[in-house]
Image: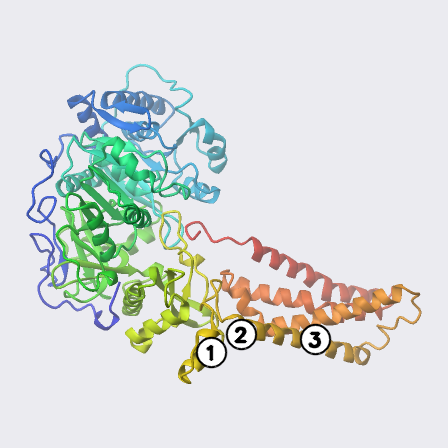
Amino acid sequence: MTDGETTDGEPTGRAAAVGEAAVGEAAGGAALGEATGGPGVGEPAVGKAAVGAPPAAGTVHGLVEEQARLAPLAVAVRCGAEELTYRELDARATALARDLASRGLAPGGRAAVALGRGTGVYVALLAVLKTGAAYVPLEPSAPDALLRHVLTDAAPDLVVTEEGHRVRLADAGGAPVVCPDLTVSADGPFDAPATGPADLACVFYTSGTTGPPTGALIGHDNLLAAHRSWCEVYGLTAEDRILQTASLEFDVFTADWVRALCTGAALVVAPRNLTLDRTADVAELPALVADERITVVELNVRTARRLSAFLERTGRALPGVRLLTVGAEKWYLDEQLGLQRLLGERTRVLNVYGLAEATVDSTYFDARGSAVADGGERVSLVGRPFPGTRVYVVGPKGLPVAPGRPGEIAVAGSGLGRGYLGRPDDTRRRFVRADFDPDGRVLLTGDVGLLRPDGVLEFLGRAATVLGPVDHPGKASAVAMVLTAARAEGVLRSHPAVREAAVVELEPRPGQRRLVGYAVAEPAADGADGWSLSQHLAAELPGAAAPSAVVVVPDLPRTRAGKLDRSALPLPAPPEHTAARTAALTAGRPVKAVGGKAGGKAGGGGSESRSVAGCAAVFCVLLFGAGAWAITDEFFPGSTDVSLVPSPYDAYFRLLYLCENLAFGAGVVYLAAGFEAVLRQGRPYRLSVLTHLAITWLLVNWWPQDNLYRLTSATDWPRETALVFAFNIPLMLAALVVVRFVVWRPPVGEQ
């Protein structure tokens, strides 16, 4: 995302622009202007003339109604054997709108739509818009915590769902539930309310990268402006068949159906949810594309990588696809060029970048015709703005910086939404005044990038992904760390054994933040272990820029949206676990025998180091246990006397005393050396500290407690009471702390 050495925020020089117009001259800084070209730089649209003129209808549903009048028998939506024409889609949406209005859904209201894959979800979305209300898309299979959060935060007037999800959604929120699959009760004419471009159309709940999902407010004007830009850049026509692979809850789902249904094209719904269904086989995609004669496809980065691997392995292609766009996460240039090579020059492969708050897509990079350049595995290019969009790279002072200097990416233009539902502070923090922009308002994205000398925007990374939650992602220190992580990640990806990589800043120990690399490597490849990869980074990067460790993992953890889940990354192994390797290297000895993959849960210091540490721990437990046994008679004289206990019960008591002493020894060792093991579980720091102390108390308390109890008279009530409150009550509290630690789950949005 950034280069901390050049983020003083002072603009120097004219703006370098992508496209035909440069914007940002008031500040003299780096900006990406409103592109005015067609589908590509200097190239004509594909097929019939693009539908780029502002529609006569001032609303999204009005544009779909217009398509129903122009081509009533054309296929609008198809899912498996089920399909709806534009006339049927519009008629069913009108009937449902009549029913929803009769149940109290009015202009300015909100309705949550939670329907499974099929044609019915598009009927429901259009019906909500026809009532003058806005829809809140909600995946019915989402975790209960996410359902409760969205329904509580959005406070919809109605929930539109299927009978199969009715009970679950009714329990998750207090709004009335409507099931169109059972009945549409209202009858008679529907007097559609007046709705205009300024009205709210939908509330996108963000994927929660930086915390709990928040509702981004998007108006009809935003969606219509986005539709015009998609038509211009993508060359959309009524002859297109657009594949819908996304889940309802994500903004790209709305983007797909708006592109199709507002253009008069056919929307084909993939039977399997490729985003959320981890059992869905990407091998099904080429056959689906061929059978349904698909021309336009959008995928997330994870699915695109799986598709590339499948096409490379099988030699198959996507016949008929003229446009494939990939987004939602950092996608490297070598991956984009590789997929372009596999699909051929007849297919445009675009890397798109955007946020839900700015109506999905803000910039795109076309790989077609690009030469394979050295370093493609180290950069992600997101190119130029969509028409109507302006993109800036700003410094810590909020002003555009010069080309070549990194900073926070800021987006402006007709796609910019209204802010966040019920969160005025977040709206003021992210949607800020900007005198250098024609509209005077920009969205601070939290992403870091730089404008290259050729006018192409390079995406470096998301501050929250690299650093964790951060209040000011545009400040110089945050930008510097994201840039350092981005460069290290690129170098790690360049290793021939690495398939996928990530570099983030973690805090393995309190107050010790450091960069850690994660690599998905070919198991049989040479140098596919953490230590070798660390040496590769150290050789390519200056000392301070190289991650302190590399953890080899079988796969990078992902969120529901398919993005990197930094909260699920394993912590690296302690430095002493790799000391043997370092010593062997500096002594000039071979290191192969030391073995082991560096890093946390994914493998750490080699079996020899672990064996030595284990033996040392056992020895210390025995040592401290023996010490407790030796001083028992000194501190508690007579407490272990079993001379009056008959056989064989005396032996049982001696065994009990032995266990108490060993537990005491284990507690002392755990107190001294167990805290890091607790931290590795990824719980909050304070909870980890309390749990460490609680487990220590659960181990050590038996030795003093039982000895004192045995020396106390059964009728000595003051002493008995003091012992109960000194030992038993803390034992209960310690057990509760451990239970809390075990059942703790991250908040919604961080899962």
Q: Residues within 10 Å of mark 2 (few under 14, many from 20)?
A: some
Q: Residue at x 33, y 48 (%)?
A: 306
Secondary-structure class at tag 1 = helix
Residue at mark 1 to residue at mark 3: CA–CA distance? 27 Å
Residue 222's tag is none
Q: Are marks 2 and 1 in contact (CB under 8 Å)?
A: yes
Check contact, mark 1 vs mark 3: CB within 8 A.
Answer: no
Residue 381 lies, with reference to residue 287, above or below; the image says below
Residue type, mark 2 in image = Ser
Residue at 84% x, 72% y: name it.
Answer: 640
- List the residue tagged with mark 3: 622
- Residues packed near mark 3 inside 10 Å, few (<14), some (14 to 19) or many (20 plus): some
Under circle 2, the secondary element is helix
Q: CA distance from mark 2 to mark 3?
A: 20 Å
Q: Nearer the viewer, residue 707 or 439?
A: 707
Earlier residue among tags 2 and 1: 1
Q: Which residue is tagged 1?
A: 579
Q: Which residue is mark 2?
A: 609
- Residue nearest the viewer, comparing 76 with 556: 556
Callout 3 secondary element: helix
Confirm or deny contact between disc 2 and disc 3 (CB under 8 A).
no
- Asked whether, in this view, residue 97 is left or right of residue 212, the answer is left
- The N terminus sits in image quarter: bottom left
- Residue 110 percent across, percent down from the top left: 34, 34
Position of 685 compared to 150: left or right? right
Observer-nearest residue: 683 or 394?
A: 683
Q: Earlier in the sequence, mark 1 or mark 3?
A: 1
Residue 63 left/right relative to 269: left
Q: Quadrant of residue 537?
A: bottom left
Q: How is the image coloured?
A: rainbow
Of the image marks 2 and 3, the number of the one nearer the N terminus: 2
